[in-house]
Image (cartoon, rainbow, N blue to C red):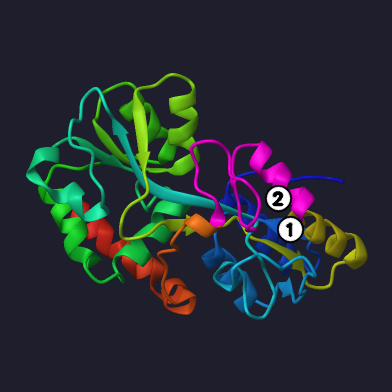
Amino acid sequence: MEIFRSGTEEVVSKVLAEKQTGSVLADVLLVSDAGTFEELKNQDLLMSYESPELEGIDSSYYDSEHTYTGTKLITTGIVVNTELIDEIPAALADLTKDIYKDELIMPSPLYSGAASYNLSVITRTDGLGWDFYQGLKDNGVKVDKGNGTVQTAVVAGEKGLGILVDYMAVRSKADGAPVEFVYPEEGSLCVTEPIGIIKGTAHEEEARSFVDFILSEEGQIATAEIGYTPVRTGIDAPEGLRAADEITNLSCDMEELVAGREADKEEFSKMFE
């Protein structure tokens, strides 16, 4: 097997460039979020394949046309430095409270794919919306690159709170950092690192087999062993993380999300310029 590994934007750029030459080298694609796969599906790049391993995977985590299926659950929530923050927030909306003024850091949706997805979901969620982001701005939130920057700032005590993906917070705690991870009361913002097969692959049988393995009980146990929440129910999550059936997926219509993604980022840029 030959593997090309990079960030989502570079992987997708490579695939699209190869499509223009008439020969996509990849057989199987795995990138961060469903929105990206929707865009690729719209360009007729993905093959429909309904794996026999879908049992135990909630239908909200795969495409109804079976062009892609989530492989794991990476949720965004709140990381708290317990040496700096006494009152641990229970919800995303709590982050606009005066007691957290100038204590919050978040990744930029202009830099992070997960943060971009979160922006589009949150701004379409009743009780949050654009008012939530305005409230964060008014409360002195720091917007700074990706999740790694947030993790570093909260662990080091530069900020008391961060909007962060779950496994980074849990790993920091396991390493001895004084942090806790909060699954927000509103629900969890989930990216699923979907997997899909390139349409017209010359190795369809092998591609189907690989997808089946990733989604199988054995493959999902392996997912947990490397520190992620399996997308399949009935498989224990790593210590400190919730299993799939314990997570409430905060989501919105995927077509609407994809259609509005660039406009959402532009609006965010204007708000925080």
Is the residue marked by circle 1 packed among few (<14), some (14-19), or many (20+) residues within 10 Å? Answer: many
Q: Earlier in the sequence, mark 2 or mark 1?
A: 1
Question: Residue 255: x, y in percent?
Answer: 48, 78
Which residue is at 46% across, 51% downward? Answer: 75
Cα–Cα span, label 2 and label 1: 6 Å
Query: Is the C-beta separation of discs 2 and 1 under 8 Å?
Result: yes
Amino acid type indicated by mark 1: Leu
Which residue is at 21% across, 65% downward? Answer: 130
Question: Residue 125: x, y in percent?
Answer: 30, 69
| Residue 5 in which image quadrant | top right
Magenta-highlighted residues: 217-244
Q: Is residue 255 visible?
A: yes
Amino acid type indicated by mark 2: Gln
The numbered disc on residue 207 is none
Residues 197 and 220: in front is 220
The numbered disc on residue 220 is 2
Residues 196 and 219: in front is 219
The numbered disc on residue 215 is 1
Question: Residue 97: x, y in percent?
Answer: 11, 47
